[in-house]
Amino acid sequence: MLGLSSSAQTTENQARNAKSESFTSLASQAQSAMEAGRLAEAIQLYKRATKVRASWSEGWWHLGTLYFDSSRFGEARDAFLHFVEVEKKQPGPGFGMLGLSEFHLGRYPQALTALERGWKLGLGSNPEFVHAVLFHLGILHARMDESEIAIERLTLLANQVAAAHPEADKDAVLSDGDLIKALGIAALRIPKLPSEIPTSQNSLVQQAGHAQALIALQEGVAADAELKQLVADHPSEPGVHYMYGAFLLKEHPPAAVDEFRREIEVAPKNAAAHTQLALEFLRTGDYEQGLKYAKEAVALAPQNFVAHVANGRLWLALGKTDPALQELRTAVRLAPTSPDAHFALSRALSEAGRSAEAAHERAEFERLQALSQAAER
């Protein structure tokens, strides 16, 4: 029996060694083929090598990029899915490439989820890759009608483009046609991809994008002049007055209120304009007027947590804790990772005398706020 066991062990070791040698050979051949530009051969070799050793993250990465560069996006997606499953140290770039693959497959929600995860985990130091991820994040958030996040991502991209061209930072941004178009779509709150914009809207989008790029570059005087021209040229286009109002809100609130009201005249179903008015009237203490707009915002966009936060805060300001709690609990349910929603709910619970629940919501706010700040760093 001992002899048989020893023989079986020897056979097993020999098989393992042969497999190891086979993998090493395949990996070496795959890299050589890739470096020599023999891409079809490299793909086949990386497929064989990852079949032998499924935990080889480097192989899955190269296989995914080879497929991606060959426009074989379905196979690229599958390879990057394997990569993020086995890569433990730095999976962020894999999620970025997974998201770009999903985008090319037209699977936009899945693309956005993967890209955001990659962004939060870290994408590495390749500026072109980081720029591609930020650009696609911007246009996908805009398509999902999440314009504020889209503008945030695209503004960061604009600043990175400017930083990469210190000798002509402004020109580098303003001459980037794809970025300008994406900024215009986001600023006008058009829930479409750049490829979906009709030719008749190109001039409007380009003009808005140019102004938004100046805002991103903190060229406030120039941006104000361009926005005034935009309003003069397109006074009846949805999104134009909202864009100018958002620009004016910090420095000239009364003028911003006028623009948001004009936006509602042009586009009565613009929930964002109603929400902005509700929040501004909350700030100035005109609670009844603010509540009117907040209720309209919730009716127009019942899934928008910001509208519910505004509504809840206004009810609370009027001393009505029950409807305030109802609205703010809805906001937390819609956006469980929003620090602002938890903070507003904690205040309402405190006002209602529910100290333990208020403390819980306050702690959740602080936890989420810390996570958000860490991600920004």
Image (cartoon, helix red, strand yellow):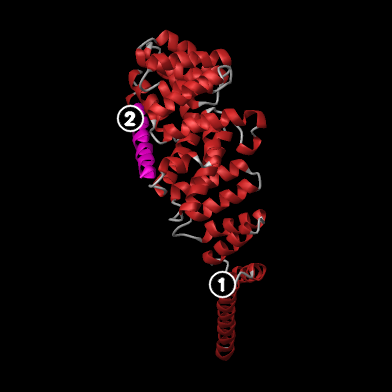
Is 69 placed above or below 143 here?
A: below
Main secondary structure found in the magenta portion = helix
For the C terminus, give its image quadrant.
top left
Of the pair 166 and 91, the residue shown nearer to us? 166
According to the picture, the residue beneath numbered tag 1 turns out to be 31
Element class at badge 2: helix
For the N terminus, give its image quadrant.
bottom right
Is 341 placed above or below 370 here?
A: above
Residue 42: x %, y % from top left: 63, 70
Q: Which residue corresponds to the image point at 38% horizontal and 33% vertical from the top-left?
A: 218
Kind of residue sitting beneath label 2: Ala
Of the pair 175 and 116, the residue shown nearer to us? 175
According to the picture, the residue beneath numbered tag 2 turns out to be 359
Of the pair 12 and 308, the residue shown nearer to us? 308
Q: Quadrant location of residue 38?
A: bottom right
Numbered mark located on residue 46 in the image: none
Q: Quadrant location of residue 323?
A: top left
Report the magenta residues as a range.
Answer: 357-377
Residue 156: x %, y % from top left: 43, 41
Specify which label sits upstream in the sequence, 2 or 1. 1
Kind of residue sitting beneath label 1: Gln
Q: Which residue corresponds to the image point at 38% horizontal and 17% vertical from the top-left?
A: 253
Element class at badge 1: helix
Give the spatial CA distance, label 2 vs label 1. 57 Å
Q: Is residue 370 left or right of residue 209?
A: left
Residue 60: x %, y % from top left: 57, 63
